[in-house]
C-alpha cells in the first residue's frame, strides 16, 4: 500500500540553535517546536520564530499545540508563516480546521493491549476518517498528560491497512526505529517518523550524534524495505 520508499523524519522538541543546525545537517525534513506551556520542551513564540528562521528551504517547522485557543494558533502561524500545525490535545476536526493551516493530528494509541471489559479498543480507521482533512495522523503512545513520554505502543496491533499518511512516534530511538518502520509502513499510504526523547541527553537538549544515528537507522530501514518490496 505504501507509495514511497523514503521515510520523512521530524525531530521534535528543539530548543537550541545548535540542535536545529545538527538536525538540518543530518538531513531531516521537519523540526517540532512545542508551544504547550506545560511541556519541559516548551519555547515561546519569539524563541520558536528564532529557531525556525535558521531552517533552509524545504525543511518545515511544525508548531505543536495542546488545546490552545484558535486565535493563539493563528497568531503563531502569522509569526512563522511557513509552519504547519500539530494538534496534540482533544481538538475536534472542526477546531483543527479553524486554524486555516495544514495540520497533523496526533492519535493517542493505548498502551494497554487488553482494555477492560466494556471499554472499546481505539479505532484508528475511524479516527483517520474523522480527521481526513489532516495531512497525516501522528501515532503516539497514550500516557498520563499529553505527549508520549518516551513510551512505545505495540505496533503489531495497528490495523493492517489504513488509508492515510501516518507519522510513527512514541519511544522511537536509533535502536528500534528500523523495526518500527518495517512493521508500520506496509499498513499505510506513506510513513514518516517523529522522535524527541530518543535523541536527547536531557529534556529539550538533543545529541548531534544520536540524531545522526537515528537518521542512519531510518535510511537502513528504507533500504531493507526497498529490498523486500523489490
Image (cartoon, rainbow, N blue to C red):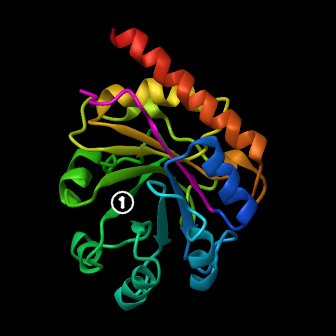
Secondary structure mostly taken by the magenta-highlighted segment of the chain: loop
> In which image quadrant can residue 35 be found?
bottom right
Give the image location of residue 112, x and y in percent.
49, 44
Observer able to see residue 204: no
The kind of secondary structure element at disc 1 is: strand
Q: Nearer the viewer, residue 24 or 206?
A: 24
Q: Nearer the viewer, residue 96 or 24?
A: 24
Judge left or right: residue 152 versus residue 130: right
Judge left or right: residue 98 versus residue 68: left
Q: For the N terminus, which image quadrant?
A: top left
Residue wearing tag 1: 104
Q: Nearer the viewer, residue 173 or 111?
A: 173
Give the image location of residue 227, x and y in percent.
42, 10
Give the image location of residue 21, x and y in percent.
68, 56
Please give the name of the residue rendered at 41% of the width and 46% of the height, measured from the top-left corner.
Answer: 167
What is the magenta range?
1-13
Please give the name of the residue rendered at 69% of the width and 38% of the height, measured from the top-left corner.
Answer: 212
Observer able to see residue 170: yes
69 in magenta? no
Q: Residue furthest bottom?
A: 71
> In which image quadrant can residue 162 be found?
top left
Residue 85, compared with residue 26, is above or below; it is below
Amino acid at each position: 500500500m505504501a507509495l514511497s520508499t523514503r521515510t520523512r523524519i521530524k525531530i521534535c522538541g528543539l530548543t537550541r540553535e545548535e540542535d536545529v543546525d545538527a538536525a538540518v545537517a543530518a538531513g531531516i525534513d521537519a523540526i517540532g517546536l512545542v508551544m504547550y506551556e506545560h511541556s519541559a520542551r516548551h519555547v515561546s513564540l519569539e524563541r520558536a520564530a528564532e529557531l525556525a528562521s535558521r531552517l533552509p528551504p524545504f525543511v518545515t517547522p511544525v508548531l505543536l499545540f495542546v488545546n490552545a485557543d484558535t486565535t493563539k494558533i493563528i497568531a503563531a502561524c502569522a509569526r512563522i508563516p511557513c509552519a504547519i500545525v500539530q494538534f496534540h490535545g482533544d481538538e475536534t476536526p472542526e477546531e483543527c480546521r479553524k486554524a486555516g493551516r495544514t495540520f497533523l493530528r496526533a492519535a493517542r494509541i493505548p498502551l494497554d493491549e487488553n482494555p477492560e471489559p466494556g471499554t472499546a479498543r481505539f479505532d484508528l480507521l475511524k479516527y483517520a476518517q474523522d480527521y481526513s482533512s489532516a495531512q497525516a495522523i501522528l501515532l503516539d503512545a497514550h500516557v498520563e498528560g499529553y505527549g508520549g513520554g518516551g513510551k512505545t505502543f505495540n505496533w503489531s496491533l495497528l490495523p493492517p491497512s489504513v488509508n492515510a499518511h501516518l507519522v510513527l512516534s512514541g519511544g522511537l530511538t536509533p535502536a528500534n526505529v528500523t523495526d518500527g518502520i518495517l512493521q508500520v509502513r506496509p499498513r499505510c499510504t506513506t510513513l514518516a517518523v517523529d522522535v524527541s526523547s530518543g535523541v536527547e541527553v536531557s529534556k529539550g537538549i538533543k545529541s548531534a550524534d544520536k540524531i545522526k544515528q537515528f537518521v542512519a537507522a531510518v535510511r537502513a530501514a528504507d533500504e531493507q524495505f526497498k529490498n523486500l518490496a523489490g
